[in-house]
Image (tube, rainbow, N blue to C red):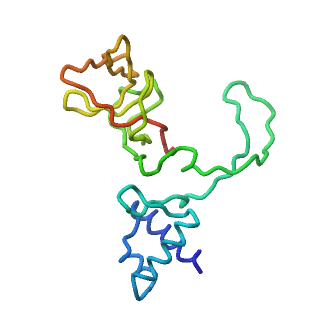
Amino acid sequence: MADGYKDKIIAFYRRTRRMPSYSEIMSMLGFKSKNAVFKLVGRLIEEGVLGKDSRGRLIPNALAGEVPLLGVVEAGFPTIAEEQALDTMSIDEYLMEGSDRTYLLEVKGDSMIEAGIREGDLVLAEKGKEARDGDIVIAEVDGGWTMKYLRTKGGRAWLEPANRKYRPIYPENGMTIAAVVKGVVRKY
């Protein structure tokens, strides 16, 4: 019975790109009380399907499910390959260490094109992760936001684009690293 409820919550999430409120779950599932919703949500949290962020809001944990990991594909010279079910992998677990610290941003512009990040891509960024030299970061610099490589030398930090058409950004009034980019998502 809980699987049918879970499927409706997943369908809502995929359709709206947000988790339903307790009231919406109550209405969607035909429950008579929020207490029934609370118990269902508790069970789904125990199963690892749902979680809660640092503010206590519902977040999807395992809504995407797992995808079979079949092997390796050669990106150089063609080789003989056999399909072999190695394991399964949760995309969420692969990309996110802390789901309550992770968010997506849509890329605008071409300053990171040589890093393989194109306009329209989504980048997965993690707040609170310590940025190191060479990381791609989301930063506020001199009052504006950007995504670039973090470069440091001799106690000085600056941002470097991955496009030869652009120059490095040396902060004049300050720079704050908000997040480190952990992955790129692109649909074809």
Left or right of residue 168, residue 186 in this image: right
Residue 68 at x, y = what percent?
A: 69, 51
| Residue 33 x %, y % | 40, 86
Q: In what quadrant of the picture does the N terminus appear? A: bottom right
In the figure, 70 relative to 141: above or below? below
Front residue of 168 and 187: 168
Task: Indicate whether 79 appears above or below 71.
Answer: above
Q: Residue at x 35, y 34 (%)?
A: 138
Name the quadrant containing residue 20: bottom left
Residue at 41%, 29% in the rendered image: 131
How far across and down, in percent of the image, does residue 59 sit?
Answer: 44, 60
Please count the marks in the image: 0
Corner quadrant of residue 143: top left
In this view, the residue in front, 138 or 111, is: 138
- The residue sitting at the bottom extreme is 32
Left or right placement of residue 73 versus residue 130 in this view: right
Give x and y (percent) for residue 112.
Answer: 40, 27
Q: Residue at x 41, y 80 (%)?
A: 26
Asked if 40 appears above or below 150 in the picture, the reply is: below
Q: Is residue 32 above or below residue 65?
A: below
In this rendered view, identify the residue nearer to me: 91 or 122.
91
Q: Residue at x 70, y 35 (%)?
A: 73
Horizontal side, residue 26 vs residue 49: left or right:
left
